[in-house]
Amino acid sequence: MPSSRRPTAIVSGLSSDAHTWNLVFLELLLDELGFLVTNLGPCVPDDLLVAECLDHVPDVLVLSSVNGHGYADGARVVRRLREHTPLAALPVAIGGKLGVAGGLTAGQRDELVAAGCDAVFEEHADAVASFRGFLRALPVRAAR
C-alpha cells in the first residue's frame, strides 16, 4: 500500500552565507511540491546542520548558497553528514552561486559529488526545472 505521508525536507544555508530569500523561495517551492519543510535559515553551523539531520532524518536535504562559498562550505558539511550511518544515503542537493569566481570548474563539481552531493545546481535558466525533476525522482519512504 502506498504511503500517504508527505515527504520531508530540510532547507539550509551554509555556515558562511547570511542570505535568506533563497531559503524562503526553496521552502515555498518544496511546500508547493508536497514536502513538509524545516527551514534552518542562514549561517547554519556545521554541527547544527548535522544534528538536525540526525534528529529528523528527512527525505532530502537542500543546501543553498548565494555568497559564492557554497562549494567549499558544502563539500565540508556533506562529508561530515556522510560520516553518520543514518545519513549515509540521505539525498542531498546543493545549489545557487557555488563559486566566488563564477561557475564551478568540472573538478569542483566532481568534488561536491565525491563529498556526497547527489545533485549540484548552479545559476542557470533551467536550474529550477532540473531541481523539480530531481525532487520528483526521489524515492518516497514508508510512513514512520
Image (cartoon, grey):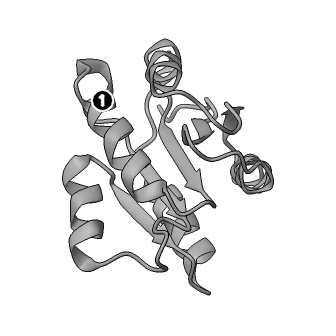
Left or right placement of residue 34 versus residue 15 in this view = right
- Residue 27 visible to the viewer: yes
Element at label 1: helix
Q: Would you say 32 lies left or right of 96 here? A: right
94 relative to 11 in the view: left or right:
left
Which residue is depicted at the point 71% across and 36% down?
41
Q: Position of residue 89 (x, y in %)?
A: 28, 36
Q: Position of residue 106 (x, y in %)?
A: 25, 78
Question: In the displayed image of the protein, which residue is found farthest to the bottom?
Answer: 125
| Res. 136 visible in picture | no
Does residue 56 lie above or below 38 as drawn?
A: above
Quadrant hosting residue 9 = top right
Of residues 58 and 102, which is closer to you in this image? 102
Residue at horizontal 58 percent and vertical 56 percent from the top: 65
Seen from the viewer's position, the closer of residues 101 and 48 is 101
Please, is residue 105 above or below residue 62 in the view?
below
At 47% from the left and 23% from the top, the residue drawn is 53
Above or below for 144 versus 39: above
Question: Quarter-wise, where is residue 99 in the image?
Answer: bottom left
What amino acid is at disc 1?
Arg
- The residue that disc 1 covers is 80
Label total for image: 1
Residue 132 drawn at (x, y percent):
58, 65
Q: Residues within 10 Å of mark 1 (few under 14, many from 20)?
A: some
Q: Position of residue 14 (x, y in %)?
A: 55, 42
Please name whichever residue, 133 or 103, is drawn nearer the observer in this view of the structure. Answer: 103
Which residue is drawn at the image coordinates 56% and 83% (left, top)? 124
